[in-house]
Image (tube, rainbow, N blue to C red):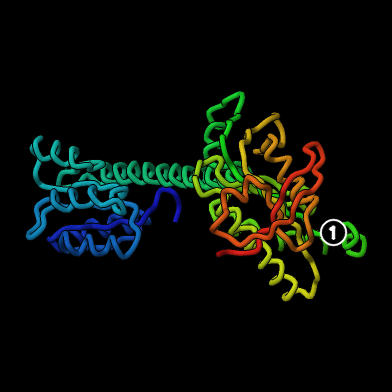
Amino acid sequence: MNAEQGSVLIVDDVEANRDLLARRLKRQGHVVVMAEHGRQAIELMRQQTFDLVLLDIMMPEMNGYQVLEYLKADAELRHIPVIMISALDDVDSVVRCIELGAEDYLFKPFNPTILKARIGACLEKKRLRDQEQAYLQELQAEKEKSEQLLLSILPKPVAEQLKQNKSTIADSFAEATVLFADIVDFTQFASNRSPIELVSLLNQIFSAFDQLAEQHGLEKIKTIGDAYMAVGGIPTVRSDHAEAIAEMALDMQKEIIQFNANTGESFSIRIGVSTGPVVAGVIGTKKFIYDLWGDTVNIASRMESQGIPSCIQVSETTFNCLDGKYHFEERGFIQVKGKGEMRTYLLKGRM
């Protein structure tokens, strides 16, 4: 079927009229389906696709006006062009049909040349509309892909700011809880594995951590080699950020145990956590990321780097937020670079 041909539905309660139209349209190469009344026509349109409807006005039960009004009110059928056909040649009927959404109006008896021209024009408009809709759907699909890619890099509120062409994106948060996790002795482990195997194992572990971050409503910040960083309480402020990070840290330990059981590996992780004020934002113009700055970030990093394998070490500020809700073991004072001695605690589990 070429661009000038289409699938046409003829709706007329008079059999002679239906047959006459059908013969003419079939000679022009169109595929023709016939309906004896309006309800049958609507049923047929719900069952198969049509490029055009030739609709008689004067029909019993459901006249052409009612059928047309029904079609244009239906989101799935309203795009089908309709040419009204009638022996009524008064202006009011023509105006009413056009106002209801008809593409055209033809008077009986038909002039074959005019009939062919009107049908051809409607089919061309339908073809152009279908092309436009397909193009718009492609654009929407590409937009959704771009949006999803952007949201996989940046938190949604930050992505919205970036789309508004803000030159500087930076926010200060009075309190947040930062988590760092690192795979113990990963450098030694990496020396005995191929790059593909190494990346595959890291991807499995960090993908599981990503799911935990999403599950607990936390923001993954980045991975650096075999280190993983997440934060609670930004960019959307929440009062239970410390609890959410504690839950994720405990679940990360479980995830590593399960990963080792499934793969036969013997990984362990150190986790460090600290709570306090942070600054968050996006810097640069290329390969940008959402990042954190501040003393809280540095302390959380030290809690991890100077922690104990398979343990969750937290600062005193985090302990104060969680005391009474979780079991802790006081580790005592440790020497923290740039901070001197700091009291730390090991998070053991939920109360």
Residue 107 can be seen, yes or no: yes
88 or 69: nearer the eye?
Answer: 69
Q: Quadrant of residue 163?
A: top right
Q: Quadrant of residue 298?
A: top right
At horizontal 60% and vertical 41% (from top left) the residue drawn is: 154
Q: Is residue 60 left or right of residue 200?
A: left
For this orientation, the residue located farthest to the top is 167
Residue 16 can be seen, yes or no: no
Q: Is residue 40 above or below residue 173?
A: below
> Badge 1 is on which residue?
186
Q: Locate residue 274, reporting x and y percent.
A: 66, 46
Q: Locate residue 108, reporting x and y percent.
A: 14, 47
206 or 124: nearer the eye?
Answer: 206
| Disc 1 secondary structure class | helix
Q: Locate residue 296, reporting x and y percent.
A: 67, 39
Q: Is residue 294 above or below residue 349?
A: above
